[in-house]
Amino acid sequence: MSQQKNQQLEILRHSLSHIMMQALERLYNAIPAVGPAIENGFYHDFDCERQITESDLPKIEEEMKKIIKENLEIEKQEMEIGKGVEFLKNKNYRYTAEMAEDLKAEGEIKISFYKQGEFINMCKGPHLASTGKINSNSFKLTKLAGAYWKGDEKNKMIQRIYGVAFNDRKELKKYLKMIEEAEKRDHRKLGKELDLFHIDEKVGLGLPLWHPKGAMLWRLVEDFWHQEHLRNGYELVKSPHIGNRILWETSGHWGFFNESMYPPIEIGQTLKEKQKKQKVKESEEYLLKPMNCPFHIQIYKNSPRSYKELPMRWAECGTVYRFEKKGELSGLTRVRGFTQDDAHIICSADQVENELGRVIDFILYIFKSFGFDIGLINVYLSLRDSNKKGKYAGDDKGWEFTEKMLRKAAQNKRLNFIEEKGEAAFYGPKLDFKLKDCLGREWQCSTLQFDFNLPERFDMTFVNNKGEDERPFVLHRALFGSFERFIALLIEHYAGAFPVWLSPVQVKIISVSESHIEYCKKLAQEFKEKNIRTEVDEANETVGNKIRKAVQEKPPYILVIGDKEMNSDRLNVRDRGQRESREISKQDFITEVLGKINQKR
């Protein structure tokens, strides 16, 4: 879609948010807050004496269509800011009045309003010329939510309604069908149906519990990760879950990352002593780690280093902990404890280009290996804003060199990347690889970053070939980003029907009757000895019921064992997605399954 069409659609969606608010005011005397256009639609926050429910949405939609049919002119007006604040207060629009007062405090002189019929509210715009410019069949209200005013948990919780909107009914129907498919693929839904994981409030929000099948899926992913890292010249390191406050002060996390970190754990007494309110004799403060980086740097610092040892490629699957608000947690994609597949590459300036290329190749290889189309990946080169040099670590020379190297590496690998000025981390430029899901949403996965901060803060050096101390370059990189998010994307990508090598259960064996159970167990053991993951359904149910359950569990193969199979070397195999079964010899079946496991990709 062209930029102009995108802008027009955004204006249409913004206008619909105002029309929805007008309908809410007409129907329920609701008080408006904010109502922007968003990706694929719009929302509006509002306050109301009655709680709006899902059953109210059709009525609100009908009122919106009436407003569209009325073809009300949408007129822009400007007011001196003092009069604007007074006007909003007189209308009892306390939320937009507060926003207007904030603008006044910031030095604004005028504010703009948009009026359509009896409805008028403060807004920057732009909007359509009239409500009649909208196709009544091009939008749909989709869901309700609560929203803290200004996103602050200290403020009142008000209501929010979301809607989706497109140019016409055809585009809307296409999107709604895509949403329906996405709901079927939702990793939270499939995680429950396939018995992979759950999140338990008693354990803690944002802290997933992995069931046997989910843990097996994790293990398969991690085993592949370890195997490929060792093959690609990495060494494995391991670090603790907590670190002394001094470490985080040295790294700078104590100051610049404190909004994402949990408060210190006081180490100086037992829980029992704390409960008895005994005085602490000697205390240290430790913090749950939000990153693995400082630990890897301390491993480097443990010994004097020579240029002959570089590059060092150290990798770790390390679990980190970051504070996330309750309302922002979402299944496996937004959690409070997650495992990063971190690696740090410590190298000299003349090694940077080669190392960047190696990492990009590794990233693309990983995506392909797990079945993701490279066309689904968007790449972003995040650069510093040279007009705000004071907010970044490092000097101009370092930034110019590293930005040049990242750009060159992306060009050499023919990546279709977008440059984003001002989006670099304070500690260095980066390449981010974002994967699009079935809804077209982008998820941050792989990243490749330079770091000017840690080498300086920890005074990292190596002895170069002239016998002089030299500062190394440090590259942060993650391939999955986090195991939790990557597995969530895997679940949704395959809709739970994993390829043979990734399936937690590869073969499901169903006994026709009780007399066949022992043979099923013996067959399962034979498969397990060949490293084929197998499960037997021994339930005292009809074969039909057991087959229906097995189909829902989505194993690649279902075997039904009755007298015929017990008394021959033939197997009755039902392949995933097929209604009809096939016959095959046991040995040929084993060979087939092992072949698919070994293929992997």
Image (cartoon, helix red, strand yellow):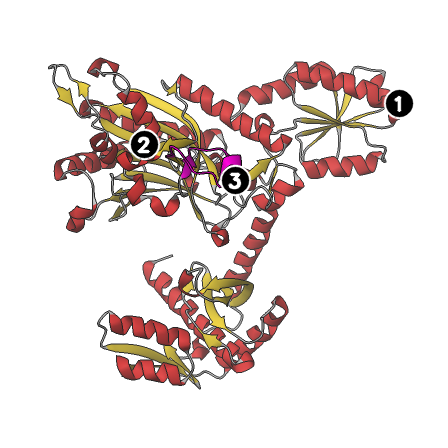
Residue 476 bears which disc, if any?
2
The range drawn in magenta is 265-284
Between the residue at mark 1 and the residue at mark 2, the CA separation in whole angstroms equals: 58 Å
Q: Amino acid at mark 3?
A: Lys
Residue 417 seen in the figure: no
Task: Count neighbours of disc 1 (C-alpha within 10 A) and say few if under 14, some if 14 to 19, many if 20 or more.
Answer: few
Q: Looking at the image, do the residues carrying marks 1 and 2 touch, with CB atoms under 8 Å apart?
A: no
Drawn side of residue 410 relative to residue 151, left or right? left
Lower sequence index among marks 1 and 2: 2
Residue type at numbered disc 2: His
Q: Which numbered disc flags the more N-terminal residue, 3 or 1?
A: 3
Front disc: 3 or 2: 3
Q: Mark 1 = which residue?
A: 515
Where residue 494 sits, quadrant-wise, is top right
| N-term mark: 3 or 2 | 3
Total numbered labels placed on residues in the image = 3
Q: Position of residue 201 (x, y in %)?
A: 59, 46
CA separation in Å, label 3 and label 1: 62 Å
Q: Which secondary structure, mark 2?
A: strand
Magenta-drawn stretch contains 457: no
Badge 3: residue crowd in 10 Å (few <14, some 14–19, many ≥20) = few
Label 2 packing within 10 angstroms: few (<14), some (14-19), many (20+)? some
SS class of the residue under badge 3?
A: loop
Q: Nearer the viewer, mark 1 or mark 2?
A: 2
| Residue matched to label 3 | 276
